[in-house]
Amino acid sequence: MLSYQHIYHAGNLADVHKHSLLAWMLEYMTRKDKPISYIETHAGRAIYDLKADEALKTGEAAMGINRARQWFDPNHPYTKSLQQTAQTDGVNAYPGSPMIAVHRLRETDRITLAELHPGEHSALELALPTAICRRTDGFAMAHSMLPPTPRRGMMLIDPSFEIKYDYETIPSHIRKYARAWNVGIIVLWYPVLTSSAHGSMLKILQNEHPQALRHEVRFPPARPGHGMIGSGLFVINPPFGLAQEAANLKARFDTLS
């Protein structure tokens, strides 16, 4: 859906959950001296101004990264990306997942990003000239390029879920991705909703990928009546140590309840 723009939600608690574990996984993968492929299906603009009117309107960053920054020590890869962004773009800038990938990866690694929204895609290209930025449907792009070269790597699937049938079609996409790229780390982010709209999708995914890691955190709604009360990651072929890192993060989120 081309109406969605993440600037309204940048730096919220779901971003803290998703981006801190993404940064950890990418840093873990680069410990080996082998190139990797990083693919993202719904990239957004890569960098966000948390003092922009859109961000201030929702106040989600104030409840999110501004509150949770202290959870991470200076050597955590997420902290490093936050600091790199502040140094290059100012203290009010927040890195999206493509920028975190650029921070954590090396010149030998290959980054391919999809973003369909024309304005977001233009901003993405401007922010990340070294990445391959395609203005196309991310699900279709991933199907067309799997398995990638290099074969070792990760894909982040991070749709807005404003298109309601995403919950119905995502299991089929992931089934095909996992079959075509059986060594790839496939990461799906999803919202935890009061409506439980994500429930049937997760049931299918868990039945089809029983060895995957499902990790969820809960937090208070951003405003009264807001339907998102948590954030989830479903990770196929999770890296060693991710479950413990995720458990440590959940303990931090539990203090918010």
Image: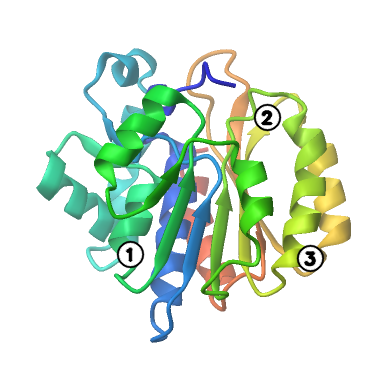
What amino acid type should be assigned to the residue bearing mark 3? Answer: Arg
In the structure shown, which secondary structural element does the residue marked by tag 1 occupy? Answer: helix
In the displayed structure image, the side of residue 191 where residue 3 appears, left or right: left
Label of residue 104 in the image? 1
Q: Which amino acid type is marked by label 2?
A: Leu
Q: What separation in Å lies between label 3 and label 2 (alpha carbons)?
A: 29 Å
Q: Who comes first in sequence, dot 2 or dot 1?
A: 1
- Give the mark toward the camera: 3 or 2: 3
Element on which disc 2 rests:
strand
Residue 140 visible within the image:
yes
Residue 215 at least partly seen: no
Q: Give the Cα distance between marks 2 and 1.
A: 31 Å
Q: Which residue in the structure is indicated by mark 3?
A: 179
Q: Please provide percent x and percent y for residue 57.
A: 34, 13
Residues tagged 3 and 1 counted as in contact (Cβ below 8 A): no
Residue at figure coordinates x 63%, y 51% from the top left: 142
Going from N to C along the chain, the mark reached first, 3 or 1, is 1
Sort mark 1 into few (<14), some (14-19) or many (20+) by Cα contacts within 10 Å. Answer: many
Residue toward you, 175 or 16: 175
Indicate whether 120 appears above or below 218: above
Q: Which of 43 and 72 is in front in this view?
A: 43
* In-front residue for pair 119/186: 119
Residue 46 in percent (x, y) is at 34, 41
Residue 193's disc number: 2
Distance from Cα at disc 3 to Cα at disc 1: 27 Å
Nearest to the eye among marks 2 and 1: give it.
1
**Precedes in sequence: disc 3 or disc 2:** 3
- Give SS at disc 3: helix
Does 16 sit above or below residue 197?
Answer: below
